[in-house]
Image: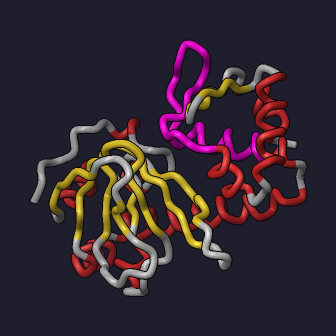
Amino acid sequence: MTDPPRRAAQQWTPRSLLAGLDPAATVELISLGQARSVETGRYILREGDTDTQVEVIMAGYCKVSMLTSQGHKALMAVRGPGDVIGELAGLGGAPRNATVEASGRVSLVTIAGPVFQRFIATHSAAAAEMTGVLGHRLAWSNRRRADAAYPVEVRLARLLTDLAEICGRPSPQGTELLVPLTQGELASMIGAALPTVQRALAALRREGRVDTGYRRLVITDRDALAGPASG
């Protein structure tokens, strides 16, 4: 058992499971698991493993990656506070289909797979929210694939706009992404070659839409970035 969550509902990542649950259901779900912390760079879940526990992110951010057919690690998504990870193995018992790594220190609640299954089975509102979460994640993946029809600069702008909703915070310069991402990771997320993404990022920087540093990215003009993002 762990203490009830202290984070206000509006602080959960948009479209995460905890963002959609009422406070009582959130407290009940969190009480079913054990709290733990994971330091940056540590693996939380590994692709191909057969364990079935489910992890609820209470604070911090995680990177979700998969191995390509060529054996390269491709970043697929970023998860934040309120998100559940490992739910497919927890609900269905299938091997892990992705690796999850801590980006910065992450606080988690670990819930045994069968316990999570019972919670979902006996809470219709939570089951509906979980279905919505899975649908949103599928839509995210489909959007990345559909974006292949657009120029790389537009694809990158769309991705950064989406990431700002997940892990952006206000800063004096605009909206800073709290998860440090390499240009290679950005390239893998939109399915583009690294040199092409480097040129697209440089163009966005020249246009005053983003500012970058070492593993640091700030959206300096979110409205302007949303222009190509909606193209």
> In the picture, residue 164 is in which quadrant?
top right
Question: In the picture, which quadrant includes the C terminus?
Answer: top right
Q: Please tell me whether residue 122 belongs to the stretch shown in magenta.
A: no
> In the picture, residue 182 is in which quadrant?
top right
Q: Residue at x 38, y 81 (%)?
A: 49
- Observer able to see residue 98: yes
Question: In the picture, which quadrant includes the N terminus?
Answer: bottom left
Q: Please tell me whether residue 181 belongs to the stretch shown in magenta.
A: yes
Q: Residue at x 61, y 75 (%)?
A: 71
- Observer able to see residue 132: no
Q: Residue at x 60, y 15 (%)?
A: 173
Instruction: Tally the numbered discs.
Output: 0
Measured from the top left, where is residue 151 in percent x and y? 89, 48
**Is residue 86 positioned above or below 114 on the image?**
above
**Is residue 155 positioned above or below 127 on the image?**
above
Q: Is residue 222 left or right of residue 96?
A: right
Measured from the top left, where is residue 25 in percent x and y? 26, 57
Q: Is residue 47 left or right of residue 36?
A: right
Find the residue positioned furthest to the top: 172
**Is residue 210 positioned above or below 83 on the image?**
above
> In the picture, residue 109 is in which quadrant?
bottom left
**Is residue 68 positioned above or below 156 on the image?**
below
Q: Residue at x 50, y 45 (%)?
A: 14
Measured from the top left, where is residue 200 in percent x and y? 82, 39
Measured from the top left, where is residue 176 in percent x and y? 55, 28
Instruction: Tell which of 216 and 148 is nearer to you.
Output: 216
Instruction: Tell which of 19 and 35 is nearer to you.
Output: 35
Which range of residues does the magenta coloring cover?
156-182
Q: Is residue 53 left or right of residue 14?
A: left
